[in-house]
Amino acid sequence: MKISTLLFLPALAVAAACGGSGAAETAKTPGDTGLQAVELPGDEEILQKAYDAAYSVPEGFFVDERAATTRSYTVHHVLDESNSYELCTDALIEAQQWEAADNESRAVNGYFVTIYENDRYFEFVRELAYTEDVGNIVEPTSPGYARVFKCNHTNRDGVDRTLVDGYAGRVDNERLDAAALRDFSEYLWQFTFFNVSRRKVIDSYASDAPAGLRHSLLLAFVVNQGTDSCDRVDVIEWRFDADTSTGEISRRFQTLRSFEATLSNGEPAFCS
């Protein structure tokens, strides 16, 4: 059984039948006149990628290193007591204490295996043990990876994880550049939940900002609108703006336009 909170993989392939839901929705115009003009893909290209089960992100997009794990696994970040934001520390001992308490509080506990770290986070590897009455368990154990961010890299203190707009955290301003902002936004994408049938990254690009740095993810969300109805495909820009003097990053989640589509004989098609 595949159990993963690394929400980036896999992309779900769920088809909805087309019914009498009428013409496609009118495209929505961004209300922020400060948006930099970017040549976006046309609806046909977005349609094909949105329904392509083999497609998830554009070439060169950051993919978490644990995505290549062959066994079932989980990846999660250790949270504060309110479960609002991810914890960070530059002290390994403190990170170990937080992770140990987190392990004790979780529904499925694991025994310690090892510690791994990189410049972004400390990672604690445990083997999770499942009881026989938890679902259809084929393997009695699976690896779990718990992460605590390093504050000198990524500080998410005070970030409301339930929101896609607003304050997103802080990156060390001495290392903050266009590449660091791209890595931040692409990493965050993989650990943010969206309740849709399919979610794809169509493009990942930098653009000019009034001040500081800006990076955007162009997203396509396929929303199931019910039996005998066409899906709604939302084309969304998720924008990350960074203040280079403080390292603070803010998010803006904005629907650019929408249209209706479905799978017809296994092929994506617009609804008329």
Image: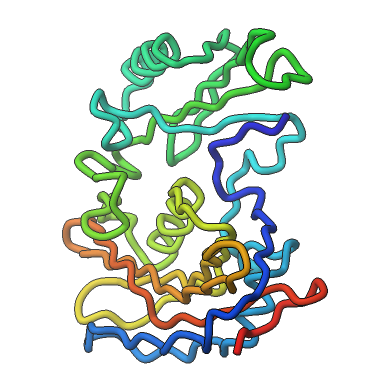
Residue situated in front as seen by the camera: 211 or 195: 195
Q: Quadrant of the C terminus?
A: bottom right
- Residue 78 position (above or below residue 28): above
Residue situated in front as seen by the camera: 21 or 246: 21
The answer, for residue 37, to whether it is visible in the render is: yes
- Residue 13 position (above or below residue 28): above
Q: Position of residue 262 (x, y in %)?
A: 66, 74
**Image quarter of residue 135:** top right
Q: Position of residue 113 (x, y in %)?
A: 61, 13
The answer, for residue 127, to whether it is visible in the render is: no
**Image quarter of residue 16:** bottom right
Residue drawn at x 43%, y 41% is 120
Residue drawn at x 57%, y 57% is 197
- Residue 202 position (above or below residue 173): below
Residue drawn at x 57%, y 65% is 200
Q: Quadrant of the N terminus?
A: top right
Residue situated in front as seen by the camera: 272 or 228: 228
Residue drawn at x 25%, y 55% is 173
Residue situated in front as seen by the camera: 126 or 123: 126
Compared across the picture, whether 94 is left or right of 183 comes to left
Q: Position of residue 126 (x, y in %)?
A: 58, 16
Q: Position of residue 36 (x, y in %)?
A: 32, 87
User: Which of the colour schemes (rainbow, by chain, secondary structure, one colour) is used?
Assistant: rainbow
